[in-house]
């Protein structure tokens, strides 16, 4: 087994086995923030990515992807049900997102979570060279830092949580709260999207484990674990270059024509997830049409909602409700050849997404809670001519960095409607000024800056940093 000096451990590998229309198996990049974030900085770095490739059964051996070695971890059908769909996505995911859906607790899920975390830790231990940096990602693997430290005390271990981390009152509901905190504290550096999350974590370390903690450091077992916020970002230059490509511009013009050359295009791009506020957004839009503030003849909404975690009950219910509502709105307000909502559930490649971003006069990103939301940042990066208004939820991590967006509280239906109208009716010079500031911010705070700042904090002497610096 070849070993690496940098190992990323994430539930997902950056690829997925999908079935092509002709029935053949094809590997492609999956929709989702974590994969989008890590793909760019790791490209061409001699790293190994440890993860699951989807499905059950033995783990296939995979070729390198963009110079990164793939080390697959298998999940059995029971692991899939109890670890991925259960503890990760029906206990932790809803709890970490303000419990907007009720988290479920089952002892069997916890056993699977421990078992699968152990398997990931063992795989990481196997592929890490002596003294390597191992960077563990996200809520599926919170026990891995502790388990890995026990196996390989020589490693530098980082943990980064891509999703929101809840206030102590919510986290305290978890029957295994102490074990989860201890697992994360196996790392040398625990990173979050927001400073508030690091504060929540420090409070919990004190309250649940009785550890001396500040918002920057926690003392545990004679070690210091550093904590902090590292807002994740995107490959801004790559998205801008893509959006600027002549073929993408042509595709965008065709798309706009296909939509009937409306005066206004509103776009939303989400995984089909109850945290994304899709139902609230549809309600706001349909009320604006019903009130006569928005006319279907000159305004269209394009809602892309790619199905996600499809066997989890709450996701199945959401999809049914969204599709019923889209059908109702189109039935009530659409005309022949002129639907009120263009609803798409397909995954798109990056160029297609860039073309969609290019045609969106208003991008509506209104999650009820979101660790960051990379779609909002991708949209800004794609607006190379500085046009376009971003309607953004206050409850997305991105709102802290993009105050020039039209900020809304998605729980407030009236506020959501007013925000959408304000974005639709904004003066072009105002829109341009706001967009320009947001683009400048994202060029300075891109994904490479994020990876560098995290790894610098994790391992100041590391030679990895200089290598990451050359991947741009
Ligand atoms: P989350 O992490 O909850 O999925 P983010 O907005 O942070 O939300 O990240 C979603 C990522 O998935 C973005 O990079 C976005 O471009 C990508 N994505 C979303 N929908 C699609 C789709 N239909 N096809 C391809 N990629 C998608
Ligand atoms: C969010 C999570 C990621 C996850 C992604 C897609 O971005 O933070 O860890 O990979 O959603 O979800 P999925 O369940 O398809 O991996």
Image (cartoon, rainbow, N blue to C red):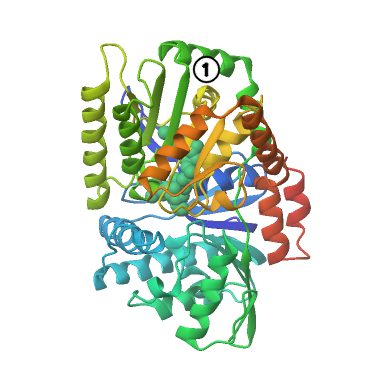
| Image point (55%, 32%), residue name | 389
Question: From the viewer's perspective, is 336 left or right of 407?
Answer: left
Which quadrant of the figure has residue 101? bottom left
Residue 322 image point, x, y percent: 26, 38
Q: Which residue is mark 1?
A: 252
Residue 210's place in the image compared with 298, above or below, is below
Q: Is mark 1 within 8 Å of ligand 1?
A: no
Residue 360's place in the image compared with 62, above or below, is above
Question: From the viewer's perspective, is 238 left or right of 181?
Answer: right
Residue 238 image point, x, y percent: 65, 33
User: In this view of the protein, which residue sits in the foreground, 296 or 253?
Assistant: 296
User: In this view of the protein, which residue sits in the foreground, 226 or 109?
Assistant: 226
Q: Quadrant of the N terminus?
A: bottom right
User: In this view of the protein, which residue sits in the foreground, 365 or 152?
Assistant: 365
Residue 87 image point, x, y percent: 32, 64
Q: Is residue 113 visible?
A: yes
């Amino acid at each position: 087994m070849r070993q690496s000096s940098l190992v990323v451990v994430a539930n997902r590998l950056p690829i997925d086995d999908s079935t092509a229309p002709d029935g053949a198996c094809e590997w492609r990049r999956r929709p989702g923030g974590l994969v989008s974030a890590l793909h760019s900085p790791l490209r061409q770095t001699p790293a190994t990515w440890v993860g699951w490739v989807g499905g059950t059964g033995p783990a296939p051996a995979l070729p390198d992807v963009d110079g990164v070695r793939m080390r697959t971890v298998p999940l059995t059908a029971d692991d899939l049900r109890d670890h991925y769909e259960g503890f990760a996505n029906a206990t932790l995911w809803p709890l970490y997102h303000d419990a907007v859906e009720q988290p479920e607790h089952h002892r069997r899920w916890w056993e699977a979570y421990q078992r699968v975390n152990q398997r990931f830790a063992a795989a990481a231990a196997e592929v890490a060279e002596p003294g390597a940096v191992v960077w563990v990602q996200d809520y599926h693997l919170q026990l891995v830092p502790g388990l890995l430290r026990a196996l390989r005390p020589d490693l530098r271990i980082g943990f980064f949580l891509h999703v929101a981390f809840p206030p102590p009152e919510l986290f305290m509901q978890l029957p295994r709260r102490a074990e989860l905190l201890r697992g994360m504290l196996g790392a040398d550096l625990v990173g979050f999207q927001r400073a508030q999350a690091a504060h929540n974590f420090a409070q919990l370390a004190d309250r649940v484990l009785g550890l001396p903690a500040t918002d920057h450091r926690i003392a545990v077992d004679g070690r210091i674990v550093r904590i902090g916020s590292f807002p994740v970002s995107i490959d801004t230059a790559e998205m801008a270059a893509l959006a600027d490509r002549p073929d993408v511009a042509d595709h965008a013009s065709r798309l706009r024509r296909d939509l009937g050359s409306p005066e206004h295009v509103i776009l939303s791009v989400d995984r089909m997830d109850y945290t994304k506020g899709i139902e609230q957004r549809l309600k706001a839009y349909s009320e604006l049409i019903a009130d006569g503030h928005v006319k279907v003849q000159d305004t269209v909404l394009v809602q892309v909602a790619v199905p996600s975690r499809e066997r989890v009950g709450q996701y199945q219910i959401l999809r049914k409700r969204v599709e019923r509502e889209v059908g109702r709105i189109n039935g009530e307000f659409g005309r022949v050849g002129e639907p009120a909502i263009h609803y798409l559930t397909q995954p798109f490649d990056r160029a297609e997404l860039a073309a969609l971003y290019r045609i969106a006069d208003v991008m509506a990103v209104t999650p009820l809670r979101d660790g960051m939301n990379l779609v909002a940042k991708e949209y800004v990066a794609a607006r190379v001519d500085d046009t376009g208004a971003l309607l953004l939820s206050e409850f997305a991590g991105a709102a802290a960095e993009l105050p020039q967006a039209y900020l809304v509280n998605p729980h407030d239906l009236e506020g959501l409607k007013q925000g959408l109208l304000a974005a639709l009716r904004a003066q072009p010079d105002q829109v341009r000024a706001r967009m320009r500031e947001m683009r400048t911010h994202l060029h300075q705070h891109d994904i490479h800056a994020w990876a560098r700042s995290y790894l610098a904090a994790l391992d100041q002497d590391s030679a990895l940093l200089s290598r990451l610096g050359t991947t741009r």
